[in-house]
Amino acid sequence: MRRVTTIGAIPKLLIVAVSKEDLLLEDKLQFKEGAHQVTLHLRGLIYYHRRHFTSVVIEKDGMMWCHDGITTKCKCLRIGYFKDVRDVRTLHDLRGERLSAVIYAESGG
């Protein structure tokens, strides 16, 4: 199911709280205002589990890196490319942690 939300100005950064598993993650969102168009790319996923947050950072080339300060300390673990995820609904759960926010941003350069 799709829901249309109107935004008054085109953002450079958009953080969306996720409360339902039926949210379909897109690798990019496009906004158009007159002749001006901005594309925001999926850059991060934030998971929550028992008072603990875990993040997934998504690079420009789509490579995903997982960071969990408790288990990985200061290291990020490479988990693969976003384009290789067959069903984006599987990203709603990461090792028992629930997706709680997604981050979209303009690409620089």
Image (tube, helix red, strand yellow):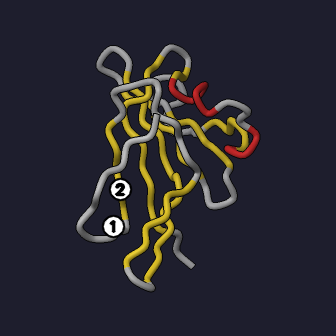
Q: Relative to 70, does residue 84 appear above or below in the rendering?
A: below
Q: Residue at x 68, y 49 (%)?
A: 63
**In the rendered image, which quarter contains the C terminus?**
bottom right
Q: Residues within 10 Å of mark 1 (few under 14, many from 20)?
A: some
Q: Secondary structure at mark 2?
A: strand
Return the residue nearer the eye: 30 or 71.
Answer: 30
- What residue sits right under mark 2 in the picture? 14
Hey, what amino acid is under mark 2?
Leu
Q: Residues within 10 Å of mark 2 (few under 14, many from 20)?
A: some
Return the residue nearer the eye: 97 or 104.
Answer: 104
User: In the visual, does 27 lie left or right of 51?
Assistant: right
Q: Residue at x 72, y 39 (%)?
A: 80
- What residue sits right under mark 1 in the picture? 11
* Picture coordinates of residue 53, whole percent (x, y): 37, 29
Q: Secondary structure at mark 1?
A: loop
Q: Residue at x 51, y 26 (%)?
A: 92
